[in-house]
Amino acid sequence: MYKVFLKKGEERRIVDGHPWVFANEAAKIEGKDKNGSLAAVYAHDGAYLGSGFINHASKILVRIFIRDGREDADNVIAERIAQANARRTALGYDNCYRAVFAEADGLPALVVDKYGDYLCVQILSLGMYQRKKHIVQTLVKEFAPKGIYERSDVAVRQKEGLPEETGVLYGEIPDWIAIEENGLQMAVDVRRGQKTGYFLDQKENRLALRRYAKGNVLDCFCNSGGFALNAATVAKQVIAADASEFALENVRKNAELNGFANIQTVCADVFELLRQLRKEGRLFDCVVLDPPAFTKSAGERADALRGYLDINLQGLKLVRAGGYLVTCSCSHYVSQQQFENMLALAARRSGRQVQCVEIRGQAPDHPTLLSAEETHYLKCFVLHIIE
């Protein structure tokens, strides 16, 4: 087994529970094994810190997931998958949920989402990729699914020296998978939908929207319509806007499944649409902003905050007095405090009097590690526009 010894002082973050060992933190590497194998990590003084899969081609040299010295990685993976799923079912999750959330569940770079009788997986590191067959066998044993689909078409795999891959790993996968969320029927396309087909992390936030989505609602960056459909249960009229016609096709399909006739779809660049609606003097009782991540790196944070400021300033101007702005960020490179500061600036520039009535985050099936801020990424603020 490889033995990785860290530079003096670099062990503090690992001792606290963070799983990543960066290549520039290593003082020396002893032993010889194949890339992707299990490596033991030690502090500068020789104290054992943990073990994980090594990748010499990645800036993340080792992803620690074993802290007790065990060397049977396959058994650990199987145990962690079962434990992660048990935690979800204990919380009442059943039909659709994130069954495994990578580092947060002690399985770095492995994501498993459950959609009814089907699973969709992402494998984002070399070590996990080399154990794909074992992972699939474990998932079949644990969930007895009708099919498992892989959505490892993520650019971050290139940093691991891996190609992007998609395809059926087990059983069969239908064109559309029917799930139930918050009492609504939703059709999920795991092949063509974003991420693994659907954004499960917003489930509780979409349900919470029903408290605020009275009257006329504008749902921006609507994707497959999760917020729009929940709003439609209580709203008079909902406009669901997105730049993707495929996403809007999904919205219309989901609206039909639930018998909603109060959802209108608009295919447009949301930045331009917000300005156009402002020029037209349109006002809404509730505006939802749930954009994709505006930054994939810390170096792009300033540009991302300018983008968030732009859409939130426009969004605030489109809410009539007494209404609500529900605004989100899914980038962990923008912290909750930075996002809140940006909202305060947007409120000041808009000239509106604004209250924050709720601060929400990702659903409980997407837990966070207090020692790894990267696992805490989703922010959701509910703002009440007083005047």
Image (tube, rainbow, N blue to C red):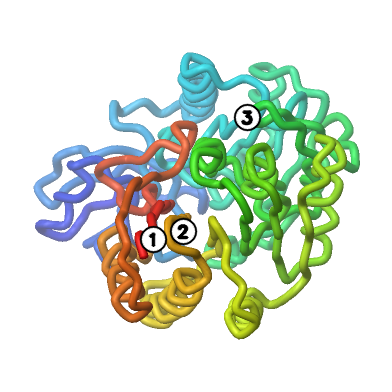
Judging from the image, what secondary structure is the residue with disc 2 in? Answer: strand
The residue shown at (77%, 45%) is 190
Task: Classify residue 370 by image quadrant.
Answer: top left
Q: Which mark is residue 385?
A: 1
| Cα gap from disc 1 to disc 2, whole angstroms | 8 Å
Looking at the image, residue 36 sits to the left or right of residue 134; the answer is left
The earlier-in-sequence mark between 3 and 1 is: 3
Q: Are marks 1 and 2 in contact (CB under 8 Å)?
A: yes
Instruction: Residue type at mark 1: give it.
Output: Ile
Q: Are marks 2 and 3 in contact (CB under 8 Å)?
A: no
Judging from the image, what secondary structure is the residue with disc 1 in? Answer: strand
Find residue 314 and report its horizontal and vertical position in percent.
Answer: 49, 76
- Nearer the camera: disc 2 or disc 3: 2
Q: Please tell me how crowded label 3 is: few (under 14), some (14-19), or many (20+) other residues with Cα within 10 Å.
A: few
Q: Please tell me how crowded label 1 is: few (under 14), some (14-19), or many (20+) other residues with Cα within 10 Å.
A: many
- Nearer the camera: disc 3 or disc 1: 1
Instruction: Residue type at mark 3: give it.
Output: Asn
The residue shown at (68%, 19%) is 143
| Cα gap from disc 2 to disc 3, whole angstroms | 21 Å
Instruction: Residue type at mark 2: give it.
Output: Leu
Foreground residue, 303 or 54? 303
Query: Does residue 166 lie above or below 302 as drawn?
Result: above
Q: What residue does disc 2 label?
A: 325
The residue shown at (81%, 50%) is 191
Q: Quadrant of the N terminus?
A: top left
Find residue 343 and report its horizontal and vertical position in percent.
Answer: 34, 68
Q: What residue does disc 3 label?
A: 182
